Amino acid sequence: MIRSAAAERLRAEAAKRILLTDGAFGTMIQNYRLDEAAYRGGYDTGHDQKGNNDLLVLTQPGIVDEITRAYLAAGSDMVATNTFNANTISQADYGAEPLVRDMNLAAARIARKAADDFEAADGRPRFVAGAIGPTNKTLSLSPDVNDPGFRAIDFDTLKDVYREQAEALLDGGCDFILIETIFDTLNAKAGVMAVREVEAARGTEVPMMLSMTITDMSGRNLSGHSVEAFAYAVAHARALTVGLNCAFGADLMRPHLAELAKLVPGLIMAYPNAGLPNDLGEYDELPPETGRQIADWASQGLINIVGGCCGTTPPHIAAMAAAVEGVAPRPLPSVQPSMRLAGLDPFVMAA
């Protein structure tokens, strides 16, 4: 197995300082006020394409490139591809399943070129994460309240969907695969297995990043796992980073992040929303407030990599960059070997 040079570079950089990832793509895309024709471009799938942000890497690549470069200019050390829904399950809503590989290839190439250009300009390493969202299916729960045993998809099918996307992202030049917004831990495990299959087929290490989404104030995701249970459930993946994203702003995410930071022996990456949405579904938290809260995270030694999710923009990332400048990154804890198991809650077997 050929080791990933990019993963070693990321670890080396993360040992020196707190790194920055990017912010939201959807928030930025909304600012362009695109109509359906602008989304559709020259493609005719028989479906309305308005809102299909992933298709823009093919129909409006200049916009995606402009957003990516805005985040790099704001201070991002890593950018993610605009591929959150670039999978055959999600794209079925738009009749765009045949375009999935092309979407992922194009998105990865846009991000790779922008990252390489910024690294060439100042010599600071830049990285590209291939973003894989959770799809709109769940392996752990039934969509039919009258049939709790029913599942809309099976594990192997979802694994294959993830594998198709991961392969295209890597072919396009991504350094890592980011399995994000994990609302169902079993979905994430299908993603982990998909990446491991790709890794075995290529004979090359494919570093993974795993990011859980908490869906209520109790600190659990939609499949019911607590933060600690999630950490144990995915420990076998030996992910490059483990962390949290979406759902909450930095203030409400903080206690759950603090718990996770004690459990994970590797790097922690977190990217909160710009607070909670208002009644119109918009985010009102301004960059200085986000920066203040991230400064608190940094001073408490909770993070190695930080960025933004829904509602965040390049000014939010710039505020985060200023907040963490000169602050030491979270030291990696020494986690003693033990049998750690997880159902919905964790179980640690006493020695």
Image (cartoon, rainbow, N blue to C red):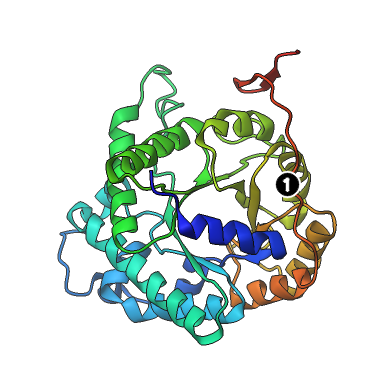
**Is residue 65 visible to us here?**
yes
Q: Where is residue 125 in the image (x, y as percent from the top left)?
A: 54, 72
**Is residue 32 visible to us here?**
no
In which quadrant will I find the N terminus? top left
The amino acid type, in three-letter code, at marker 1 is Leu
Residue 148 vertical placement versus 262 (above, below): above
In which quadrant will I find the C terminus? top right
The residue lying at 67 percent from left, 39 percent from top is 264
The residue lying at 55 percent from left, 80 percent from top is 123
Q: Where is residue 240 in the image (x, y as percent from the top left)?
A: 55, 48
The residue carrying mark 1 is 332
- Count how many numbered circles sit on residues in the image: 1
The residue lying at 32 percent from left, 43 percent from top is 198
Q: Is mark 1 on a helix, strand or loop?
A: loop
The residue lying at 25 percent from left, 48 percent from top is 92
Q: Where is residue 156 in the image (x, y as percent from the top left)?
A: 30, 29
> Would you call the spot at circle 1 few (<14 residues within 10 Å), some (14-19), or many (20 or more)?
some
Q: Nearer the viewer, residue 81 or 144?
A: 81
Residue 116 vertical placement versus 295 (above, below): below
Residue 47 vertical placement versus 39 (above, below): above
